[in-house]
Image (cartoon, coloured by chain):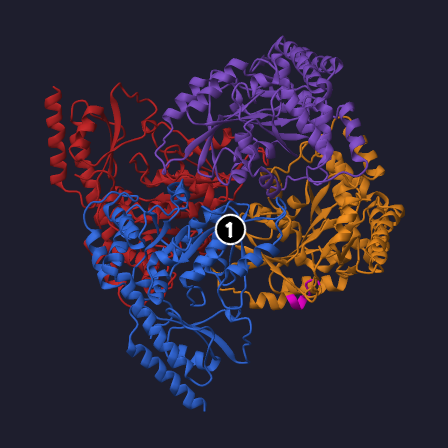
Chain colours: A red, B purple, C blue, D orange
């Protein structure tokens, strides 16, 4: 019963098969291989616009390298207060940008609205050179609370950002889950909505290790190969990542994988929400389920081998009060989650409830 | 009528006289001059404990170099949300520390209590290596709201910090004003209270350009001369700063200057607080007066040549609401402020009030 | 005919098989997987001493992260003037160390001797804080000229380094080839000889993407997981690298692969050296062959599909003069090179020679 | 007898008088004071072209901030192997540029010629992104060997640099001495010769602490106030530096001071060169005299209170061999050196020679 994280899941057979195929024989190194070049082309096709793409090995590297193109060392980047870049990437944003800062916003509904952004920028000190200069907005789609921005929300937000002179980065570690949830064209929540540069992750959605920085504004890609090299992200056998992206994109496989993960989360969410003593922290919109539950239940589940994670107390909505003995728990489904796993998990939950009653 | 900032004031004649004396003749360079060595000794005398001292040219350099000794690039430093290091030093903390982050706390009373610190650290994600590791607390004394920590408040706070494994830095750009206000021994609010490293500023209190990093924990000073050199702060004619500190400390001149500045602020504060339509934003405890006033009044004062500053709206206490047409204004007195200046300022204020009535 | 680089070769079937096995099913992420833990254990076994190991995705990351543990921002690292870290890793050493510098030595025999090191350190300005402080020596084994340090050379050099107060890093991107060439125990040219920290590469010797930082002095590993995370090298599906190292080490596979590559280079070197107009730039001691040849020959070979690389003119021995129309060319053999490839290459060479005659 | 360094000399009375005048009364801070603005204007007049100027507190800060505008973190800067930025500024260039590297050239005549530059760039590996990308040339005028570039040499060199796509920085810590030596217009060896950005020092030529970054290409100054602030170089009482530059430039005082220093060096050089057992290391062209002398003589002079410095052995011309017991010694004259000091020094030298004979 793995709901620990989608990055603990195995690799989709189709992707693994392609990786094995690519691993044999001679290929040019350092991004000059055929697979990487084909993957870049396929990404342009998938998004419906020409893109410049660079492949890297981790989501942290993708995010922080992307930020380095839109934030000088004296700049600040606005993001949600639970954003992965703000909470879960240690000091990597400062390293890759040479010292830029993050300015986290806490909002009521877990997303940042155009109005939130405008108000935040207005009240942030902006007397340069004493204060930092805000240069960019970074948005996670899916958010770290498992929420999904609608295309029109995203467009309004990016339009506001541009009006304020900010560039827009999207952390798309789970972009596939957002596209699957919205049943929209990938372009509708990215470049058509105003995203300038995207971190696109496949590792959490069926790949082994495959992350990309996708430039919709190709001017930002200037010198990017130098940034990649100097940060230790220029993989010699670059086919490794290119091949995974080819298989991931081929025939819409990425959305197929994401749809399955989302559907599993939806089922799990409904089952957990119907459990006495358990309540959702946030609505389930993609493949992550955030609940508040008694700590005794959480600990018993863990003891019984369920992989799930006690989550940041600071992640709950503004109005929500944790009660005594209550803990936030995150369950993540993946492309490989099964109905049987959910049923087995719920059996354990119900069994605990009976004991506790 | 200069209430713009204490760093717009001129230089105390005693300090200037010593600087002129030091400027003549031959002296070793790079901190090996007699003045710098004497100043270090005098600082130890003033604080009542042996100290290791390095002289630098700006408060930003002093603060950020001090932080670099207690925050590795992957560390975070807790500070008040209006702290100079958080608001007014651009991205210097990240540059000097190699990427450490600041974690600002907003508190109700404008200071950080031991309890505030403990609660903040407890709720901050601390799952290394994903999250940053908090390594230090930085406190401003006088605070950026013009408040002064009592010795026992400071001791409780630093004790809590140490109990949490954090080192303690004090931004003492206006430490002289705090010591003067508290009528305490300088050691009582620094090393005896648990401060590990102090940025000590003289520039705002009668000197021309004289800042120091004072190590109470001398082990932190290891390699500091290398940090000084590589950050462009190793002044060749180092006597420039050493001599100013000698004159500043000699015979308690620093506290004399600070007492005068504080007394002037106290008078001004009382006069402003008694003015209809003007209210204090924070109590006046040292040499800064923060008020809320009608913007029309502020603008007229400025037009009439009064130096004062419209201040960050985000600096007001949590409960305070700015009314329409109201603006935060900072008045700073200095060693050279006079009763006549205050009287002249209040004449303008009263004249405006009569017109407005 | 691939002699372009050993990182253009495919993946050894045994390694690929293990990778496929590891890719399925659930595993903890971020280095907590079973494969990574087993690989760390196997590395300790292989080197005959307990080690602390961290897995990363590129050789540049391995080298520069290793250097960051032995070079503070104000330090300098001595290395050979053709060292990969000095020439081929862009500015990555400065990024990862926060600003440390490299001091390249050009030596007559392509290696650094204990005497070279002592003389270099003695003549390098060392008046701190003005000058940088040399803190480390970095050695490549195999060197970038394809040479191999004998165990006693390595021990003398590291002993000298330690006597000068320097720590010793080894860039072992091709360490397997060195061990195979020397027919020694891996410990004899690493920790027993005085190496403190090793970058160990498998990617050039049959793996897909597998690099490690191996700490023989485990005290240096303090905070290393934070360094890994903040530099974007903490791979979520960390089994990817761990599994490759397991298969690489299993049953001495790594040395088997390296021995084959070395044998192929030896044959190729002899054949090329016997060709009129072609001369060796350096003796062939591992799996790289450096020759000087007429540019016409080089260009024809390339036009005929031979992968080989025109190499840095600055890499030739001090006494060697390039003649007009002569170019340095590097041929690299790999675990997958064949006698047939060499024969086919030599056919082209001889055919060109006949035409030219 | 101070020949230790021109930065050990006192302050010219005219400059000190102006500094005292400026120190009194109220002035805007952070570069908005009247003195700084006047100084910027006067620098434009002195150079005969509009300039954008920023004042800083040390030569290291001036050099490294200037470099940060022409070298991205992945760039390299070519400079002489004895350049102050390469030898005497620790790792400051890497800190201020975010990681750029220096590539030192050793030349036969102590200066870099256009041909030296072209040959060096040609032989430096330039296969991006693996190798660093050379973006700039930095030249010291006066050089660290006390030599002076002729206007036509400088123009040829900068023209060559521009043709190679490099920007040109000049370290003018002793530019006044060069202008005085050449009897040329200051523009002739700076912007008219192709210098893009200049570090201009007054501290070694009669001021107390006054350094400037002078942009001839004003486009490079974009964001420079942010660079200044974040590096702790934005002085609050900025009049301190502005006033010194005003007095320094007023009525050609800077060149007057420099001419005197040069004349003293010339006398000293001739006297030393005529001494048996003492030989010039480099010709004396400005205010520094480099000699090789018996170490016994050097030590006796030091014991007798003469300030002079044993200098880097690596600084001597390529063909020069230090003999046993011979040491390089630097003598620097200043605006305040006197004939009496030189006579007294030479008396000691001759007295030693008699004893030794």
Residue sitting at 68 percent across and 12 percent down? B263
Q: Is residue C141 visible?
A: no
- Image quadrant in which the C terminus of chain D is located: bottom right
**Which residue matches tag 1?**
C163
Is B42 colored magenta in this rendering? no
Residue sitting at 40 percent across and 77 percent down? C302
User: For the residue carrying disc 1, how many other residues have a C-alpha within 10 Å: few (<14), some (14-19), or many (20+)?
Assistant: few
Q: Position of residue C132 (x, y in %)?
A: 58, 48
- Image quadrant in which the N terminus of chain D is located: top right
- Residue extending farthest top: B274
Q: Position of residue D167 (x, y in %)?
A: 63, 57
Is D114 colored magenta in this rendering? yes
* Quarter occupied by residue C337: bottom left
| In the image: residue A140, left or right of residue B240 | left
| In the image: residue C157, left or right of residue D178 | left
Q: Is residue A256 above or below residue C9?
A: above
- In this rendered view, identify the residue nearer to me: C339 or C40: C40
| In the image: residue C357, left or right of residue A258 | right
Which SS class for mark 1? helix
Q: What is the span of residues highlighted in magenta in the rendered image? A: D110-116
- In this rendered view, identify the residue nearer to me: A135 or C108: C108
Q: Position of residue C296 (x, y in %)?
A: 47, 82
Q: Is residue C229 visible?
A: yes
Chain at tag 1? C
| In the image: residue C283, left or right of residue D35 | left
């Amino acid at each position: 019963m793995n709901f620990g994280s989608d990055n603990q899941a195995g690799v989709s057979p189709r992707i693994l098969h392609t990786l094995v195929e690519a691993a044999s024989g001679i290929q040019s190194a350092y991004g000059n291989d055929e697979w990487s070049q084909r993957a870049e082309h396929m990404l342009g096709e998938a998004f419906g616009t020409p893109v410049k793409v660079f492949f890297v090995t981790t989501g942290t590297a993708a995010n922080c390298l992307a930020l380095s193109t839109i934030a000088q060392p004296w700049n600040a980047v606005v993001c949600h207060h639970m954003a992965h870049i703000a909470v879960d990437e240690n000091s990597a944003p400062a390293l890759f940008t040479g010292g830029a800062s993050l300015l986290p916003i806490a909002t009521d509904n877990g997303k940042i609205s155009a109005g939130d952004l405008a108000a935040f920028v207005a009240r942030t000190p902006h007397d340069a050179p004493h204060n930092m200069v805000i240069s960019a907005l970074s948005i996670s789609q899916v958010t770290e609370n498992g929420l999904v921005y609608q295309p029109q929300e995203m467009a309004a937000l990016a339009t506001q950002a541009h009006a304020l002179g900010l560039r827009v980065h999207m952390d798309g570690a789970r972009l596939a889950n957002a596209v699957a949830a919205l049943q929209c064209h990938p372009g509708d929540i990215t470049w058509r909505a105003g995203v300038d540069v995207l971190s696109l992750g496949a590792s959490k959605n069926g790949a082994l290790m495959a992350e990309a920085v996708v430039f919709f504004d190709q001017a930002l890609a200037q010198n990017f190969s130098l940034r990649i090299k100097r940060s230790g992200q220029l993989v010699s056998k670059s086919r490794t990542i290119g091949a995974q992206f080819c298989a991931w994109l081929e025939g819409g496989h990425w959305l197929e994988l994401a749809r399955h993960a989302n559907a599993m989360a939806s089922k799990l969410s409904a089952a957990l929400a119907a459990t006495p003593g358990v309540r959702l922290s946030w609505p389930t919109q993609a493949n992550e389920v955030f609940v508040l539950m008694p700590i005794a239940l959480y600990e018993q589940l863990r003891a019984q081998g369920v992989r799930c994670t006690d989550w940041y107390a600071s992640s709950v909505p503004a109005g929500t009060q944790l009660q005594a003995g209550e803990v936030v728990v995150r369950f993540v489904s993946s492309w490989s989650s099964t109905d049987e796993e959910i049923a087995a998990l719920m059996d354990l939950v119900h069994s605990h409830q009976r004991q506790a009653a």
